[in-house]
Image (spheres, helix red, strand yellow):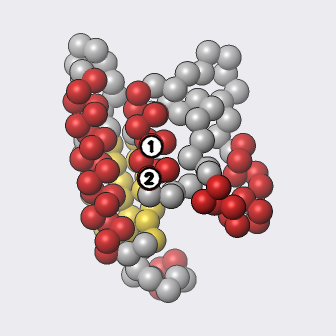
Amino acid sequence: MQGIWIRCNKALFGLDYDVMLGAVYVNSMSRDRFPHHELTDAFSSLFDEVARAVQVTSHLVLCGDFNAHVARLSEVTDVHARLLQAHPALCHARRCELRNCKANPAGKMLIDLVRQFECV
């Protein structure tokens, strides 16, 4: 996993706290080049970095190429009740329309991460 974190001034987003912006690249999973334990290590490192970022500020933007297929998995839970009431389309925003769309291990780990940190 490769990543960079930037602390952005709150005025840039018109918020009350600064924003941590993380740009991340997780290598694509290939049995030959990137075994499952390395993928697990990469997401464990990402988890640690996100945990450190949210200690700086509660506002977090995490973007990048995670090589993750989430299929029909959703990070949206009851924690997001007010957000869902205001924007109900979030429940269905990333529904996979492909017939053979399946979540991969990276997708499952990404969803676990965003659920843990209550991200959308």
How far across and how far down the image is residue 103, in percent?
A: 52, 26
Q: Is residue 67 visible?
A: no
Residue 45 higher or lower than 108, as above or below: below
- Quarter of the image for the N terminus: give it: top left
Cα–Cα gap, marks 1 and 2: 6 Å
How far across and how far down the image is residue 58, in percent?
A: 43, 72
Secondary structure beneath label 2: helix
* The quarter of the displayed image where residue 96 is located: top right
Kind of residue at badge 1? Asp
Q: How crowded is mark 1: few (under 14 residues within 10 Å), some or many (20 or more)?
A: some
How far across and how far down the image is residue 78, in percent?
A: 65, 55
User: In the figure, is residue 37 to the left or right of 60?
Assistant: left
Kind of residue at badge 2? Gln
Identify the residue shown where x is 44% and y is 57%: 117
- Quarter of the image for the C terminus: give it: bottom right
Residue to which mark 1 is pinned: 112
Residue to which mark 2 is pinned: 116
Residue 18 higher or lower than 39, as above or below: below
How far across and how far down the image is residue 100, in percent?
A: 62, 15
User: In the figure, is residue 54 to the left or right of 98?
Assistant: left
Q: Mark 2 and mark 1 in contact (Cβ < 8 Å)? A: yes
State the residue in front, 78 or 86: 78
Secondary structure beneath label 1: helix
* The quarter of the displayed image where residue 81 is located: bottom right
